[in-house]
Amino acid sequence: MGMTSFLVRRFLTFIPTLIGVLLITYLIAYAIPADPVRAWVGEKLMNPQTLEQIRVKYKFNAPWYEQFTFLVQQLLTGQLEDPVRHRNVFTEITSRFGVTVEVAIVGFLFLVAIGIPLGLLAAVFKDTPVDFAVRIMALVGSSLPAFVLYYFLILLLFVYTKTTYLAGIPEPTMACKTTISTLPQNTPILGHLASALGSVPMFSAIMCGEFNVVVDTFKRLYLPGLALGLLNGGFIARIVRNSLLDALSAEFILYGKARGLRRLSVWKHALKNAMVPVVTVLGLNFGGLLSGAIIAETVFNIPGIGRYMYEAIMRLNFPVIIACTFLVAVIYVTVNLVVDILYAVIDPRIRY
Amino acid sequence: MKGIATRTIAIIIAVIVVIAVIAAILATRPAPPPTPTSPTPTETTPTPTPTSPTPTPTTISPTPTPTLKYSLHETILYIIANEEMTRIQLYKAGVADIATITPARWKDLNGTPVGNFYLILEPVPTKPRLTIQYVILNTMREPFNIVEVRQALAWATPYDTILTSVFGNLYTKLYTIVPNGMPGYTEYGIVKYEYNRTKAQEIIDKLKKERGFDPSKYEITIYYNLGNTARAQIAALLQNEWTRLGFKVHVEVLNWPQFLDKIDHFNFDVALLGWIPDYLDPDNYLMPFVWGGAEFKDLKYWENVAAGDVGKYLSTVERYVDTPNYIVVVGPQGTGATYTGPTNKPLLVVGYILDEEATKKNWEEPVSMVTIGAPGWKDVPVSALCKISQRVLDPKIREAIINAAVIVFNNEAPMIMLGQAITGLNYGSWVLNMYYPLTKSARYDLVYEHPEAPVVDTGVQGIKNDPKTMVIATIGWPDTFDPAKSYESFGWEIFDQIYSKPITYYYENTEPEPELAVAWAFTKEGDELYLVIRGGVVAYDPWNKKTYPIDATDVLFSLWRAVRLNLPGGAQWMIDSFIDVNASQVLSESEFEQVLSKGLVAVYHGKSVEVKSMSELLSVFNYAGKTAGVVKLKMKFPYAPILHILTTGVASVIPMEYALGDKYEAAIKESNNGKDPSAWAKYVIEGEEDETHKKLKDYPVSTGPYYVADYKEDAYIILKINPYYWNATLWEQLYGYRPTP
């Protein structure tokens, strides 16, 4: 089977997956015995007729399947409205997703920079104090409540050393934003691509050559990035260590050594084989970061998609819950697809 | 070699861990006590000077120490940080001048040093606020329909523990629904419920003996909302105490939507809640809580009635209440009633004709605070007091009626009052002249900072928090920037900075003062209110760098538009319930002179003065400047608190020309210059699709001291000083600051 048919098959599986995820999420939210409309309008006095108008608008008087169909229809036609903020949900998501992408990128860089070298070290110095230290770090990272590490880092790097900020997100100049937003008019395909990338402030800044914004972005986001990297880096290190040790003890390595391959060549072959599970875990981690690190966004005061989702859940904001679930599901299936493709790149034995 | 490398790396890791542990210990060490070196505490205690921010102030001096030069806050930055610990870090680092902090943490943070200054988070017990905390008993359910049970529960509530341990002394004792500081507050004739379990037990025992009441057959559930730790503690305390009386008490926590749903539809036994009034009038407590859902075809009162004459006005006496100045007697209108109560004070007789159909409708599908008060207490005579109090203009009579309702409500305890908030100082000690109005927010152009205040990078748009910048770390996000829609405290705080209203309050005073209306007067019947509009005011549109002149048409349009849009969740009811906006109109000064010639009543600073000319009216308000027309507001019924409503966010004045754009001229023409506002309906549609709403919700303009310069949702809002502010001369007098448009 070729790559094309593999991709077609995978894309076809996306449809039931996405519908299933949306349906399950909707039914869970629907099962909660509360009046979402009342939560949307707040706690103040409210005319019952007005509440009824909103219920009718969002089909809360209709059976659940009609509500669900209505929401999905609105979602697919891009007309879904956030009933709390009274704006198109996609506009709201776009304005937040760019920031989440930035956090995900910085976090991922730290994750890789911390996890992979430590994993390699642990494998190289197997059963030594280094190995123990890395394993303890992985254990601590997995079991430490995230907020404890976050607040410790804030105290250290914000309150005492003042090397970062806890407010605002650096953005390119208005001139740059205008230039990016007009690109689709001039060059339709590339322009749209550039415009989509430009929804991430850091990418806009790079395209406009405003590198000071990129530097400021790192200054603002290195703290959450470091925190996310430290939390998950230990786990990545363990995966790298174990995969590498497995690969090093494989028969083909023994065979290579017996044939007198140089140490570097042995390591090269072992590493390549060890990377398959590592890429899987890194992919899932990146998907998780792209879906919004809710606690990190809240603690580090980042107006990303995670916080938006959290608020939507707290207010039973069905349209936003559905739209965000859809986004997260799309991210995960896409990341999984990319990981599957990467398998073939890393390991030539894997064919589709 | 391998061994050396291993050891070296292990040592490095060990060193890092040790440093981290030491740093963690240092970081979590309690803050050292404050070192009040500079400035001294006397400078930081907010002692607002009750001066008028009008163009002609005479005694304003924000410089208690003449050697120090203070700066106007040219930039206001709201940093949105929904996590409290993050706000605390912003506060400690000097990034924020003010931060929203829950009372439980005040003690820990008070005195935390920030450079040469420190954080001040202190309650001021002598300054009550209007926020109240209470327990609602669903009186539509057993056993809360029994007065004695409610009273027993009120006596079995550990108030002192709640005030000290739960509210951290940021609340004070409260016995009545109308709190201290509000007109109508009284301690006369009320029961001062204290924690007295013996008394509570005696009441229950008496009920057992006389009526066979068995508390053990009642399962009571106390509800509170998820995340509210204070209410969780109160619920636990009540559960403990009330269980001892013999009831089976459960506690259930619900997420906010579920909680609201239960409260709205009376699907609860007991619920813990709080209330902040919308405007400065007791009606804002009576209608949401005390009113029993009864509607009336007619309500009348008679003053100084002889005891023997009560039968001339009422068919029966349903209640009589001893208030400080009157005995208030209530019953259905008719004849034949016999009054046998006290006669040591003048009798104030209130008679009603019940609208049975409307009342039945309210009771059939009760919605809390909409068709009936929150405890569902269906008391018809007290409902009559609530309703008639809205219409009475005579302050003495009104006070007596409100007192009567308050006293009965207290005696019969449909709600258990837990506490009334007190003012809490919360700012860095470098912030000076901070003040706390009761129903509005402080205006940050009247608050200033010590010249040596910390200068810290905020990280937002390159803004530094220096003495010219006010930074507030807070939570949430304004629902919208459109005053016709917004109905929440953050939105209204922004409106207090960016919009002028017809009427305002100065600092912490509660007396209505001129803002865009330089004078006002009622007809003698109270069915019309006239506002004389200030001349020379312009609105600033920062998005297009344009200005628009403001006159009476804009004021009427702003009020009319809020009602016309009728946006879900908006505060338009505050206008629509009392003002017939379509029957209101704009008058020229000469047309108003004709109205004045018949005589109007100017109500200002507690005095009512009959005036018959514009000059007479303006002199009452000590105003001699230009005017820009007159707005006649047609009242649906005489409503004394209307002046207070005109100070709120929903009354914010916006320029009609900005809202309507190129349709402005046509709208003005068709309405005959504001004579027929209903003609504007062609240009403003009901609901969220209206173009004026779409424009104003995201792109607000300014008629106030600041304008919205930039914002990023859920991240920050930046306000800049409005160079076209009508009262900018004030800044020159206060700070020597002259805006450059």
Image (tube, rainbow, N blue to C red):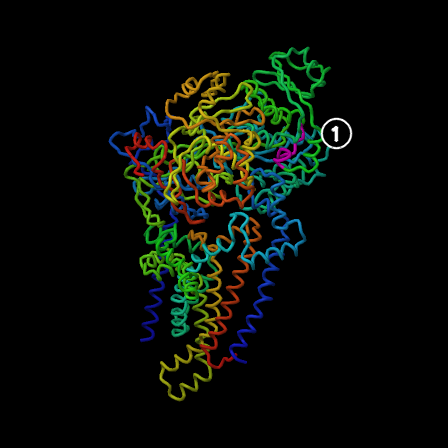
* Residue that badge 1 annotates: B211
A161 left or right of B513 in image: left
Q: Where is residue B413, by image quadrant? A: top right
Residue lying furthest bottom: A259
Indicate the quadrant where residue A70 lies. bottom right
Q: Would you say B61 lies left or right of B478 here?
A: left
> In the image shown, does B90 or B504 lie closer to the viewer?
B504
Identify the residue shown where x is 48% and y is 75%.
A343
- Magenta highlight range: B368-379
Q: How many marks?
A: 1
Quadrant (top left/top right/bottom left/bottom right) for the N terminus of chain A: bottom right
Give residue B539's quadrant in the image.
Answer: top left
Residue A233: horizontal and vertical position, in percent? 42, 65
**Disc 1 is attached to a residue of which chain?**
B
Of the pair A258 and A185, the residue shown nearer to us: A185
In this rendering, position of residue B69 left or right of residue B378: left
Q: Give the residue at x 33% y 27%.
A: B60
Image spot of residue B310 (x, y percent)? 68, 14
| Residue B640 located left or right of residue A140 | right
- Residue A287 visible within the image: yes
Label 1 element class? helix
Q: As displayed, is residue A235 above or below residue B41?
A: below
Which amino acid, by three-letter code, is at mark 1? Arg
Up/down of B479 relative to A128, above or below: above
Question: Can I make out residue A136 in this image?
Answer: no
